[in-house]
Amino acid sequence: MSKLQELATAVENGKSKLVPGLVEEALAEGNSPIDVLNKGMIDAMGVVGEKFKNNEIFVPEMLVAARAMKKGVEVLKPHLAGESSTTIGKVVIGTVAGDLHDIGKNLVALMIESAGFEVNDLGVDVPVEKFVEAAESDPEVSIVAVSALLTTTMPAMRDTVAALNKSPARSRFKVMVGGAPITQEFCDEIGADAYTADAASAAQVAKSFVS
């Protein structure tokens, strides 16, 4: 078994202690940093995401795998610095004003980061203006992800998306929405580009927007 396969298995199984060493070994074996990232870690997180969608694993296992990957990325970062495109795009993410839930948002941020994006996490209880400013101030932002976990904060999501839709920079970013009470119908109604039901799907959709 190659070191890349060993690394992928370790990431899938959330073996945080083993991952940094396996990254070093995979590089020593002659694999390019990009291959170590893509084949050793991002593909493994893709497998984890699929298992999660099929209810073969649950949030704790997914978090453990994402953490393991994070450890690997820390070791890999200095090697990637020389490669021109270390990220496939920038994502702004946050939970809307009045909503303090962050577990779902954090999971989405982790999975999107695992897919190769740079993530600007605005946190929870984020005012409309802050979303708009984050989207407009950085020309590399290609996706704005808006989360709401309470039915009472759905109007705040509606307001946030409406403000983003009015932005002069709107043509260069996509708006994604998600959270327990959110549906495809609501997404269509408020004019967002995509709704995803879980973190793994969010990462897949984000990738499809930039490919």
Image (spheres, rainbow, N blue to C red):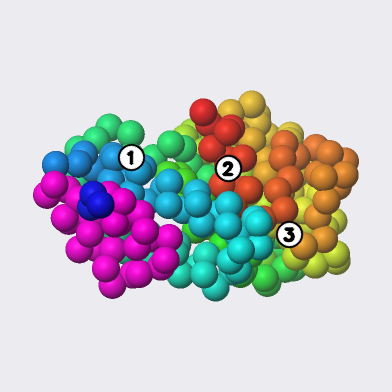
Question: Measuring 27% from the left and 68% from the top, which residue is drawn there?
Answer: 18
Name the quadrant containing residue 68: bottom left
Quick check: 121 left or right of 5? right
- Horizontal side of 203 relative to 77 (left or right) equals right
Which comes sooner in the sequence, label 2 or label 1?
1
Position of residue 158 in the picture relative to residue 53 (left or right) = right
Q: Residues within 10 Å of mark 1 (few under 14, many from 20)?
A: some
Q: Earlier in the sequence, mark 2 or mark 3?
A: 3
Residue position for label 1: 86
The residue tagged with tag 3: helix, strand or loop?
A: loop
Q: Is residue 116 left or right of residue 79?
A: right
Residue at numbered disc 3? 179
- The circle on residue 200 is none
Image location (x, y in percent) of residue 130: 61, 53
Amino acid beneath label 1: Thr
Amino acid found under the numbered disc labelled 2: Gln
Decide whether residue 65 is among the magenta residues. Answer: no
Q: CA distance from mark 1 to mark 3?
A: 29 Å
Residue 105: tell me if it is visible.
no
SS at circle 1: loop
